[in-house]
Image: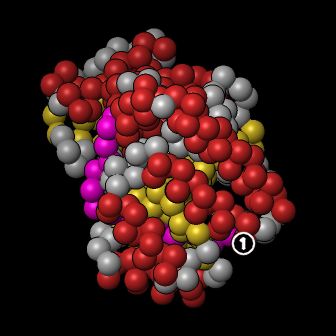
Amino acid sequence: MIKLPKKTVVNSSHGKLILVGEHSVVYGKPAIALPFPLVKVKANVELINDTIIIKSRYYVGPLNKIPEKMEGIAVCIKETLKRLEKPVTGLLINLESTIPLGRGLGSSAAVAIAVVRSLFAYFDRELSKEELMELAHLAETYAHGNPSGIDTAAASNDGPIWFQKDNQIESLQIGASFNLIVADTGRIGNTHAAVASIKDKFKSDSKATQQLINQLGEVSEQTREALSNGSVKSLGKLLNSAHDQLTKLGVSDDGLNKLVRTARNAGALGAKLTGGGRGGCIIALVRNLEEAQSVADALINDGARKTWYFTLE
């Protein structure tokens, strides 16, 4: 009987939120993303006398039989082991996640980051930020086709970031505390349909569509200033403006618009969808945590599946 050394490594990652700039970021405009620490992924790696086994809420079994929807993670694991010059065998990878799938909260990016971190730690190898981004991006490519990279960047950073495609990622300074609510519609977002809607609008009226993309870029610039200055009221107005523009682009839907209206009517300074749209989540800004509770209650009463609130400092 072969005795295996007892070794277990656990690493983690958190979800992300796009504050402003979703979709326009694909067209070269800046976006601002935040870590969402209330939802997390843990990846536990341990030695076994077997092939590589994946254990998760959605699939338990060998890596080579992983379902298509998780193929990106399989590719990420194989490429990471190749980078580490290790065989694709003899490991149990246990994934535990509190990030709901398909809600624009960075689930696939967070899983990939946690897995890469755990595998490097398991084999006692240092992991550079560049390697982490590159390897995690593989899973994102399978999940989203041609991702901007913002999910991976936000899920691997512990503070707000300024993201613009092909530019260096910048950390943002916050001039005050901002209290935010996230509400889940309970519906998986349809990013592909949202992206197709924008492409169709470019075909039918390229000038007006480009103007909306440019306005979203300007909102990102102004949001950066509002965060830096600690201007809570200005940020609320900017969130509302961003949602209106995304709605005109066909990215929102009735369910998202309903929750946005509910949040505003319950006292939120501003609210908008966050992520790919056509389902998923909204984000709202409130004055304090007491108000956050009352707005969260209103959202639940009006159909939200779940809410979270936290302070960005």
Give the residues in magenta: 177-193
Residue 185 among magenta residues: yes
- Amino acid identity at mark 1: Lys
Identity of the residue drawn at 34% across and 21% down: 75
Q: Position of residue 16 (x, y in %)?
A: 52, 50
Write down the quadrant of residue 312 in the picture.
bottom right
Q: Position of residue 79 (x, y in %)?
A: 41, 17
Crowdedness near tag 1: few (<14), some (14–19) or many (≥20) residues, C-alpha within 10 Å? some
Task: Work out whether residue 10 can be spotted.
Answer: no
Write down the quadrant of residue 240 in the picture.
bottom right
Task: Identify residue for label 1.
Answer: 233
Residue 236 drawn above or below residue 126: below
Identity of the residue drawn at 20% across and 45% down: 58
Q: Which quadrant of the rendered structure holds the C terminus?
A: bottom right
Q: Position of residue 197 (x, y in %)?
A: 37, 36
Q: Nearer the viewer, residue 213 or 115?
A: 213
Q: Would you say 235 lies left or right of 77 here?
A: right
Residue 197 among magenta residues: no
